[in-house]
Amino acid sequence: MKIAFVGKGGSGKTTLSALFARYLAAQHRPVLALDADINQHLGIALGLEEEDAAAVPALGDHLDEIKDHLRGDNPRIPSAAHMVKTTPPGAGSRLLTLGAADPLLRRFAVDAGGVRLLATGAFTEEDLGVACYHSKVGAVELLLNHLVDGPGEYAVVDMTAGADAFASGLFTRFDRTFLVAEPTRKGIGVYRQYRDYTAGFDIPLSVIGNKISGPDDVAFLRDQVGDDLLVCLEHSPAVRAMEQGRLVAIGDLEQANLTALAQIRHAVDSTPRDADRLHRQMIEFHVKNALAWANEATGCDLTDQVDPGFVPGPAVETAG
């Protein structure tokens, strides 16, 4: 399952992304974590030292290499220059799998306590004033377009904060989206914005209450978001210790928070995969981007990249 954690800056979405990825890994599940936030903190949240987190290869710095690998010998994509963030796979494309032998994961992923971590890379001084962060996040969108995840496999994405996720079709690439909300008016404001923007896209969206101090906080969230509230996590000394860099096992979490993580996993596992929706929206956003800017940028009609007879899935063979 492909899972997104979203929310306003400071809501705790990176912490929740890391906790859930670690929870899955502790249950010996294949889990890939992708840091798609402009503030690259997921590696540290997963327990890496700062220097090790900074050394994770930046996907945004290797876009041409990633594109060349994924396009394989797809005749509809003659070069990396003709591939954009929304380009869908077709016959001859290489698909990404969560197996240990996947060449892209061997090349770019690092182990973070049993979780394989990919990172877009931080904004650099060279990017200031001349580049958009979404050019880096485009690598994540491409990877998700080409990812074939099987039963019991999880891809967890820490998204960029607030409404920035809607600058591309990346927000439609997920089987389940969790919005992390503090019990505040600002937290609810981001929820309403996200709910309104996703309306009409059939995206399963649930709210995770975070930094909960007591029943009044839960009641506030329930009153504001209704049945979208899935679960709440309490203030946690164990999480604070993790954030301070101390080594804390996932099993050292408070029982209430462990129960909340179990409920999140149950919600994910109970979500039926809508492969038709995922494929349809991938194509829709590619065509939209092609007509809006990508055809002009590349000098060719990128709508021709859509392979009408190709639907990615576990049975599809990848290019060699």
Image: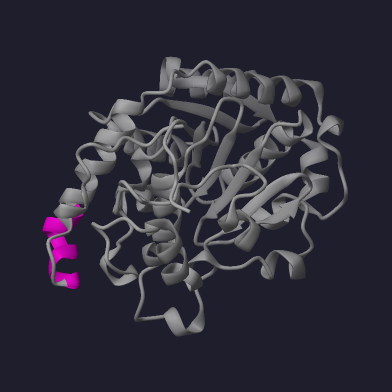
Q: Is residue 246 above or below residue 197?
A: below
Residue 168 shown left or right of residue 63 in the figure: left
Residue 171 shown left or right of residue 104 in the figure: left
Q: Is residue 132 above or below residue 261?
A: below
x then y, percent, for residue 103: 59, 56
Q: Residue at x 38, y 38 (%)?
A: 189
Using the image as rendered, state which of residue 253 and residue 10 is in the foreground.
Answer: 253
Q: Residue at x 56, y 68 (%)?
A: 58
x then y, percent, for residue 228: 44, 20
Extreme residue toward the bottom, this view = 126
Magenta stretch in the rendered image? 289-298
x then y, percent, for residue 50: 75, 66
Q: Is residue 295 magenta?
A: yes
Using the image as rendered, state which of residue 200 and residue 7 is in the foreground.
Answer: 200
Q: Main secondary structure of the magenta part?
A: helix
Extreme residue toward the front, this view = 320
Q: Is residue 171 visible?
A: yes
